Image (cartoon, rainbow, N blue to C red):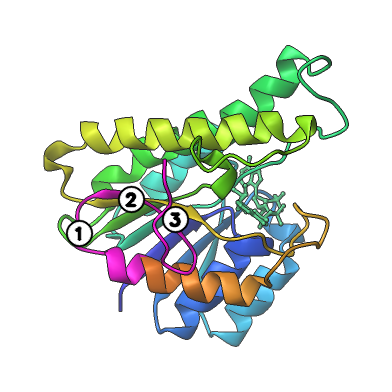
């Protein structure tokens, strides 16, 4: 059975990805910052009779990711999916965000995300393995639409993630693992206040189809959940 590690799977899209991979017969290692509060993830573990394993990890804490890497030392990953992300304080904008506001979003959405990939890259199968980053269409510079100022920080973080994902991919030995920057669509989750064009199962079915189709291409691509390639 192939194995996926999903970082940030307590709820929303991460939980949906765990459900979708499990439904397709995969072993899933799903992380939560606070497993005691991840009721829906535990319910999935019970339903799937151990096919989904829950691990504790806060992506902001490098020591957590290193400890997880050590706990999973005997496991080879077919997919590493880094989903964890935050929206930041949307009551502010470029005039009022503090350094801490900016640092929180950029650290979680860009640098700790890339840091987790750096730590786990040696566990991903050469050739057919995939490292996927949960990006967003708002991370595209050329796809820009007129959007409110309070989205600028989140948008900067996903554009930054796209850029540094490419740097990460280019530094990988032989670039022998496929790297994906994925836009899941506008999905009804806590992050969007339950507003969106699609629900979590629709987004996650598309994302998993996309990941499986891209496996083996050994390139870095930027795709929407329905397979459409996005302009950088
Ligand atoms: N929903 C959309 O329309 C949409 C569109 C484009 C991109 N995205 C991206 O998709 C990803 C998931 O978003 P969502 O909509 O599912 O949001 P969500 O419902 O708010 O879920 C966010 C997930 O990320 C986890 N997380 C946040 N900070 C973390 C940290 N420091 N360490 C580990 N886990 C952390 C959360 O865990 P806790 O339960 O512990 O907080 C939760 O599982 C994000 O990267 C987001 O930017 C979403």
Residue 201 sits in quarter: bottom right
Front residue of this view, candidates 215 and 75: 215
Residue 81 vertical position relative to residue 171 in the rendered view, above or below:
below
Left or right relative to 199: residue 213: left
Give the residue at mark 3.
81
Residue 149 vertical position relative to residue 56 in the rendered view, above or below:
above
66 magenta-colored: no
Give the residue at mark 2.
221
Front residue of this view, candidates 177 and 77: 177
The 10 Å Cα crowd at callout 2, few under 14, some 14 to 19, many 20 or more, is many
Q: Residue furthest left?
A: 174
Give the residue at mark 1.
217
Residue 62 visible within the image: no
Answer whether labels 1 and 3 touch (C-beta < 8 Å). Answer: no
Determine the secondary structure under disc 2.
strand
The 10 Å Cα crowd at callout 1, few under 14, some 14 to 19, many 20 or more, is some
Instruction: State the extent of the magenta-drawn residues as a range.
Output: 211-232
First along the sequence among labels 1 and 3: 3
Q: Could you say which disc has been placed on residue 179 in the image?
A: none
């Amino acid at each position: 059975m192939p194995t996926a590690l999903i970082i940030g799977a307590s709820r929303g899209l991460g939980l949906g990805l765990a459900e979708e991979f499990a439904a397709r017969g995969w072993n899933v290692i799903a992380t939560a910052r606070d497993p005691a509060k991840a009721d829906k993830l535990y319910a999935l573990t019970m339903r799937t009779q151990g096919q989904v394993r829950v691990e504790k990890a806060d992506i902001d804490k490098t020591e957590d990711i290193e400890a997880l890497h050590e706990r999973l030392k005997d496991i080879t990953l077919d997919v590493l999916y880094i989903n964890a992300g935050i929206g930041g304080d949307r009551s502010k904008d470029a005039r009022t965000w503090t350094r801490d506001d900016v640092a929180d979003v950029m650290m979680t959405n860009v640098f700790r995300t890339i840091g987790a990939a750096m730590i786990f890259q040696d566990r991903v199968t050469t050739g057919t393995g995939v490292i996927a980053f949960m990006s967003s269409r708002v991370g595209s510079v050329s796809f820009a639409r007129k959007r409110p100022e309070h989205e600028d920080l989140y948008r900067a973080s996903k554009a930054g993630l796209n850029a540094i994902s490419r740097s990460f991919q280019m530094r990988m030995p032989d670039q022998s693992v496929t790297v994906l920057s994925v836009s899941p669509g506008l999905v009804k989750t806590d992050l969007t206040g339950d507003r969106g064009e699609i629900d979590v199962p629709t987004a996650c079915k598309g994302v998993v189809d996309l990941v499986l189709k891209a496996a083996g291409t050994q390139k870095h691509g930027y795709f929407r959940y329905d397979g459409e390639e996005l302009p950088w």
